[in-house]
Amino acid sequence: MDGRKPYILAIMIRVIVAGMFVINKAAMDHGLNGFVFVFYRQAAASLLLLPIAVVLERRNAKSIMSSALLFKIFVYALIGITVTGNMYNVSLKLTSATVLAASTNSIPVITFCLALLLRMEELKLRNPSGIAKLTGVALCLAGVLVIALYAGELLSPVNHHRAFAAPTHGHASATAAKTLMGAAWIKGTFVAVLAVLAWSMSLVLQAAVLKEFPNKMLVTVAQCLFSTVQSFLVAVVAERDFSMWKLRLDISLLAVVYSGFLVSGLNYYLQAWCIEMKGPVFLTAWTPLTFILTIFCSSFFLGEMVHLGR
């Protein structure tokens, strides 16, 4: 069973992330501000994890108080949560859940290259595992290029009765599909690429932090607390109309609870656990699964029209 743990964790992480893309897109279509959302998400995660950490890790709390280690976690939180989360939401607002999930398919390639440069990963071309790694990276990169450059046939939504999408006019689906091909799609895709770069860097940095300090719970709590403060400052600057900070009892609240508890709370802990066992490259190798799940879920729940290719 121990040998299966990393695979089970990786699949669970991908399923949770796919759900995040779909629910977050629905919330933003209903008017939730992306910068405010990141703050609420991280605050919810901190409220969940801090009491658990106090109960379970009181004896180990002093060992994390190294200023150098705290600075590394601060930088990781800034890059991997605050910057990445806000850029993901900007991209999500301009494009769709499917486009954003497609861009994440380049994460294995970028993470693998960074891990090689930092000598955290080895590539032995005479070894079957090394050949498999290189082949996987090449296929992943080829798939990303096809998705980015080729626009094939338009696939109709699986479910025309949208569960989460905001009310739209009758021609909204066609308009949304055209938007993906226009200026908004280009801007959103560019922002998504920047988010992917930041996320890949954060995964490599997280692996280094866990190698130095393997207490996953304390690292996860610290990064959530740091990112809560960071994202609050970003949100205050980006959205000064405090009427936009009000949460309603709709999909917006569901998105905050889901992303705060399952993504920033549980998922980041599972991610740290998986990276500790198998490294950052193994975790990112499962990223295409999120794309497949997001295509189906966004089509079924949001009624998105997906291009076969782009």
Image (tube, rainbow, N blue to C red):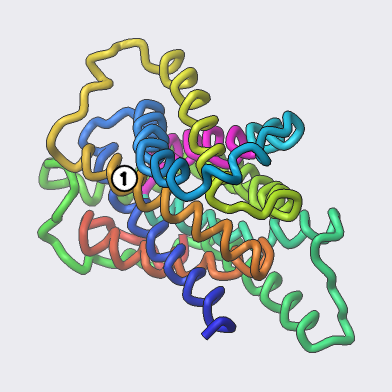
Does 114 lie within the magenta span? no
- For the point 50% across and 36% down, the residue is 87
Residue that carries the numbered disc 1 in the rendered image: 25
- For the point 12% across and 41% down, the residue is 167
Residue 5 in the figure: left or right of residue 302: right
Residue numbers of the magenta segment: 76-96
* Residue 201 against residue 306 in the figure, above or below: above
Q: Position of residue 219 (x, y in %)?
A: 59, 45
Q: Badge 1 local density, few (<14 within 10 Å), some, or many (20+)?
A: many
- For the point 64% across and 69% down, the residue is 277
Q: Position of residue 254 (x, y in %)?
A: 22, 44
Judging depth in this view, the residue of 24 and 63 nearest the camera is 63
- The kind of secondary structure element at disc 1 is helix
Q: Position of residue 27 (x, y in %)?
A: 25, 40
Residue 238 in the figure: left or right of residue 226: left
Q: Quadrant of residue 303?
A: bottom left
Main SS, magenta residues: helix
Q: Residue furthest front?
A: 59
Q: Position of residue 295 (x, y in %)?
A: 35, 64
Residue 187 is at least partly visible in this image: no
- For the point 45% across and 64% down, the residue is 14
Judging depth in this view, the residue of 83 and 296 nearest the camera is 83
Residue 112 in the figure: left or right of residue 41: right
* Residue 279 against residue 245 in the figure, above or below: below
Judging depth in this view, the residue of 214 and 150 nearest the camera is 214
Does 83 lie within the magenta span? yes
Residue 11 in the figure: left or right of residue 178: right
How many marks can you see? 1
Residue 52 is at least partly visible in this image: yes
Q: Amino acid at mark 1?
A: Lys
